């Protein structure tokens, strides 16, 4: 093999140590808020949860507590366990107000608290299971989908009526034409 052939087979690494990686397209959230904000993270809150707040029986404090818990729940296998005091500080509430609202969420079947203790037996922050909330929101999805499909059908029908064929049909029935 000639020296030139050997040179052609050598993979050249960038001199500055950086690879030529394709640039990532910013997410819509990043486009709205900016990279400086989103690099600190953001929370996925299903729109159905927000839209069905009243139907789920959630007051504004309870919804805010749920959103705070969702901020801590980034891994499906690891349930959130923030201290009540931290939630109270974030929400501008007393720890007792957080506890009372958590109890209401638990009674509604949306949240389950699991007591957590340290190795020495002292109480630690609770683990919060949101399985009940997830199940209730999932149960609402078919209804939200049916509403979406009905809305899309109305939109399609309105657009079809605006086409020339739709206008001809309207004129043939004695309706208003152009």
Image (tube, rainbow, N blue to C red):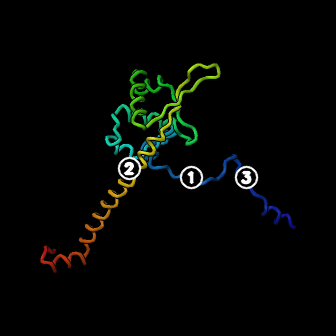
Horizontally, residue 79 falls left or right of residue 90, namely right
Image location of residue 37, percent across then percent down? 47, 38
As displayed, is residue 108 above or below residue 168?
above
Q: CA distance from mark 1 to mark 3?
A: 18 Å
Q: Which residue is located at x 49 percent, y 31 percent? A: 113
User: What residue is at 67 percent from the left and 47 percent from the top?
Assistant: 18
How many discs mark residues in the rendered view?
A: 3
Q: Is residue 37 left or right of residue 93?
A: right
**First in residue order: circle 1 vs circle 3:** 3
Disc 1 marks which residue?
A: 23
Q: Earlier in the sequence, mark 3 or mark 2?
A: 3
- What residue is drawn where x is 87% and y is 67%? 1
Label 3 and label 2: CA atoms lie apart by 53 Å
Q: Residue furthest bottom?
A: 172
Question: Which dot, 2 or 1, sits closer to the camera?
Answer: 2
The local secondary structure at tag 2 comes to helix
Residue nearer the viewer, 54 or 169:
54
Q: Which residue is mark 2?
A: 140
Q: Which residue is mark 3?
A: 13
| 10 Å crowding of disc 1: few (<14), some (14-19), many (20+) | few
The residue positioned 80% from the left and 61% from the top of the image is 7
Residue 148 percent location from the top left of the image: 34, 57
Mark 3 residue element: loop
Mark 2 or 1 closer to N-term?
A: 1
Question: Where 91 sits versus 24, above or below?
Answer: above
Q: Residue 42: x, y in percent?
A: 48, 40
Rendered-image quadrant of the C terminus = bottom left
């Amino acid at each position: 093999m000639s020296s030139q052939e050997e040179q052609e087979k050598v993979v050249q690494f960038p001199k500055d140590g950086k690879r030529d990686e394709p640039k990532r397209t910013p997410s819509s959230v990043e486009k709205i808020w900016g990279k400086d904000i989103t690099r600190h993270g953001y929370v996925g809150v299903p729109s159905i949860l927000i839209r069905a707040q009243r139907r789920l029986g959630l007051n504004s404090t309870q919804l805010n507590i749920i959103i705070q818990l969702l901020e801590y729940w980034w891994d499906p296998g690891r349930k959130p366990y923030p201290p009540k005091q931290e939630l109270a500080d974030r929400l501008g509430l007393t720890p007792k107000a957080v506890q009372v609202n958590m109890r209401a969420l638990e009674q509604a079947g949306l949240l389950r608290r699991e007591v957590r203790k340290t190795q020495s037996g002292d109480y630690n922050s609770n683990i919060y299971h949101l399985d009940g909330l997830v199940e209730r929101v999932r149960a609402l999805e078919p209804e939200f989908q049916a509403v979406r499909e009905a809305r899309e059908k109305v939109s399609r029908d309105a657009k079809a009526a605006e086409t020339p064929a739709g206008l001809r049909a309207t004129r043939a029935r004695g309706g208003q034409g152009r």
